[in-house]
Image: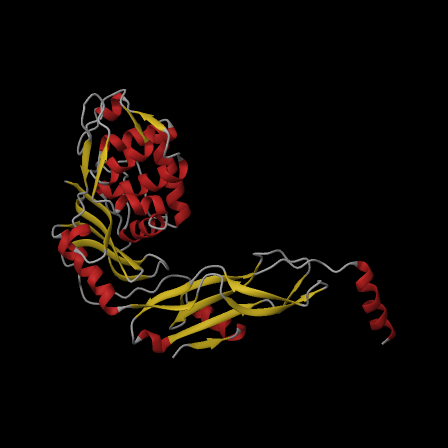
Amino acid sequence: MIRRLGIFAAVFMIAAGVLMPSVCAGQDLCPNSKAAVLIDVASGRILYQKNMDQQLPMASTTKIMTAITAIEEGNLLDTVIASLRAQNTGGSSIYLQAGEKLTLEELLYGLMLQSGNDAAVAIAEHIAGSCEEFARLMNKKAAGIGAVNSNFINPHGLDAPGHYTTAEDLAKITAYALKNPEFKKIVATKQKKIPWWGRDYSRVLKNKNKILWQVEGGDGVKTGYTKKAGRCLVASATRDGWQLASVVLNCGPMWEESKALLEYGFNNYKPVVFYEAGQFVKTIAIKKGKEERVRLVADRAVAVPLTAEERERVVLVEDSEDYLQAPVMEGQVAGSVKVLLDGEVIMYANLVCQQKVKERSIRRVIPEILKALIG
């Protein structure tokens, strides 16, 4: 049973909680991982965590941040010319040659399927002029996502002093990136052919992520390994339209423990939809407007995964202004809807005005003023 509370109860319960996802630690699903997280991609709710705040090197899972930064900052159809620095980058490679030309989109496939460190450098130099400047873009974007305990020194993830993240931050970055259609398409691709300069046949890029084959609904996202970071894996799967993502850092059996995390989520939680995006919630009064009331709708879906037991402890809080003064703009924020579990906010959406309401003309207002004065 879901309870609904008004503004006064909402104020009391929010004061007792914090604006963070709930964390269900459960049993130790990842005994071999230094850190691990399971996240609901849509809401950002963390369903499992182990040492999620510990700062650790993350190897090529860095490329999740590289890819989403490049997609948002660049043009996928741009021609990128590989530099000598890209050609000479060590580690995993798609074997770029200095002067070779590929589109940004083609390089992103090389980056995410075959984990090309040379592709990472070529992308970074194209977008920002240098790897160092691109790393600054990565850090700025990570902070905007809320991944504030990370620091990126390079775009490929090779070990470097000061290059680190946390399982929580990497989960947040991944959930953000998976909402981008281009990113989502690339990381779910099992095999891709791209041109190979100077040869009469194409490069065949094979995705290193076994989750795509081994887990029901597997659809991403990135492997990683260096001696310092150990084996790292960010994985995702979607079932019945519900997507979960897992993170394991420095984990020998990374495939097994990632599968265990994903299965734990799908087996123990179910998404509960309170409001769809754009769904009507309530109306409020308008003062001095051409319309007397305005409809408020949720600006995004209010949906969060819950266990059967948690559903008995959930409260839905609908909080809004008593009235608005005209003029009112379409999309203007006038309140919020929050899902609280044991007094803690685990999901929220803004309540926004569904339509514009213009101010009444002075000719329509004067009779009301005179009527009020006369009594």
Q: Is residue 120 above or below residue 36?
A: above
Q: Nearer the viewer, residue 243 or 231?
A: 243
Q: Is residue 117 above or below residue 278?
A: above
**The quarter of the displayed image where residue 125 is located:** top left
Q: Which residue, as the protein is rendered here, is positioned at the far right?
A: 374
| Image quarter (top left, top right, bottom left or bottom right) of the C terminus | bottom right
Q: Nearer the viewer, residue 113 or 167?
A: 113
Q: Is residue 230 visible?
A: yes
Q: Position of residue 208 (x, y in %)?
A: 17, 43
Q: Position of residue 241 (x, y in %)?
A: 31, 60
Q: Is residue 161 visible?
A: no
- Seen at 27% across and 48% down, the residue is 55
- Seen at 18% across and 29% down, the residue is 90
- Seen at 45% across and 59% down, the residue is 300
Q: Position of residue 373 (x, y in %)?
A: 85, 71
Left or right: 269 in relation to 354: left
- Seen at 36% across and 76% down, the residue is 313
Left or right: 299 in relation to 175: right
Q: Is residue 86 above or below residue 29?
A: above
**The quarter of the displayed image where residue 50 is located:** bottom left
Q: Position of residue 104 (x, y in %)?
A: 33, 32
**The quarter of the displayed image where residue 16 is located:** bottom left
